[in-house]
Image (tube, rainbow, N blue to C red):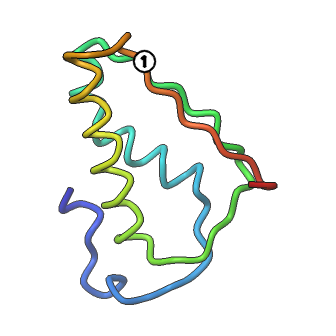
Amino acid sequence: LEKFVDAEKEKSMGPINLGELIKKVKESLEWKIKKYKIELTNDIEKDVIIVGNFSQLAQIFYVLIDNAIDSQMFFGEKKIHLKMNAED
């Protein structure tokens, strides 16, 4: 999780490609996804741009996806699906 925190960028806001952000978060959780055999699909369109703080949003999505993995380990089908398009 610390890899998303950059002291200089911590307070900066700007355009963020949500698909790229999720890709980086997924890569950081890949060990856990493989360990627990979770199927994580990412259907977030490549052109979804949001304005925000990259570090903070990465931390939020990390925690959300990590919690989803934890809940799927015990109670679910071991599938997590992320979806968003530019119109949302």
Q: Secondary structure at mark 1?
A: strand
Q: Is residue 82 above or below residue 88?
A: above
Quick one: label 1, few (<14), some, or many (20+) residues within 10 Å?
A: some
Q: Kindly indicate the quadrant of the structure image that contains residue 1.
A: bottom left
Q: Kindly indicate the quadrant of the structure image that contains residue 35.
A: top left
Instruction: Judge left or right: residue 44 versus residue 2.
Output: right
Outermost residue toward the front in this view: 75
- Which is more toward the observer, 14 or 83? 83
Q: Residue at x 36, y 89 (%)?
A: 11
Q: Residue at x 42, y 18 (%)?
A: 79
Instruction: Judge left or right: residue 71 versus residue 57.
Output: left
Which quadrant of the figure contains the C terminus? Answer: bottom right
Q: Is residue 74 above or below residue 53?
A: above
Residue denoted by label 1: 79
Outermost residue toward the right in this view: 87
Q: Residue at x 58, y 68 (%)?
A: 16
Q: Residue at x 49, y 55 (%)?
A: 21
Residue 84: x percent and y percent? 66, 45
Instruction: Judge left or right: residue 58 versus residue 51.
Output: left
Residue type of the residue flagged with mark 1 = Lys
Q: How many marks?
A: 1
Residue 5: x percent and y percent? 26, 71
Residue 65: x percent and y percent? 35, 41
Residue 44: x percent and y percent? 64, 42
